[in-house]
Image (cartoon, helix red, strand yellow):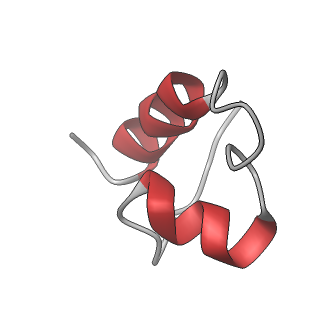
């Protein structure tokens, strides 16, 4: 899967925009991995 660079830099920003990772937090590590991949970290 290929992603474009995201303007989101943190899990918190993604959560504010989409509610992802805001209920139990279990997917926050996955969200961070995706952000790192997208943003070249």
31 and 19: which is toward the camera: 19
Residue 17: image location, x then y, percent: 70, 77
Residue 34: image location, x then y, percent: 52, 36
Answer with left or right where residue 33 lies relative to residue 40: right
Residue positioned 45% across, 46% down in the render: 35
Up the image or down, 29 lies above or below 18; here it is above
Residue positioned 50% across, 70% down in the render: 13
Q: Which of the 4 image quarters holds residue 23? A: top right
Residue positioned 55% across, 33% down in the render: 28
Residue positioned 61% across, 49% down in the render: 3
- All told, the count of numbered labels is 0
Q: From where the camera sits, is residue 5 visible?
A: no
Q: From where the camera sits, is residue 8 visible?
A: yes
2 and 26: which is toward the camera: 26
27 and 5: which is toward the camera: 27
Answer with left or right where residue 5 lies relative to residue 31: left
Quadrant in which the C terminus is drawn: top left
Residue 30: image location, x then y, percent: 57, 25
Quadrant in which the N terminus is drawn: top right
Up the image or down, 16 lies above or below 14; here it is below
């Amino acid at each position: 899967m290929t992603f474009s660079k995201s303007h989101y830099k943190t899990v918190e920003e993604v959560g504010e925009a989409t509610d992802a990772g805001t209920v139990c937090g279990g997917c926050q590590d996955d969200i961070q991995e995706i952000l790192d991949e997208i943003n070249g970290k």
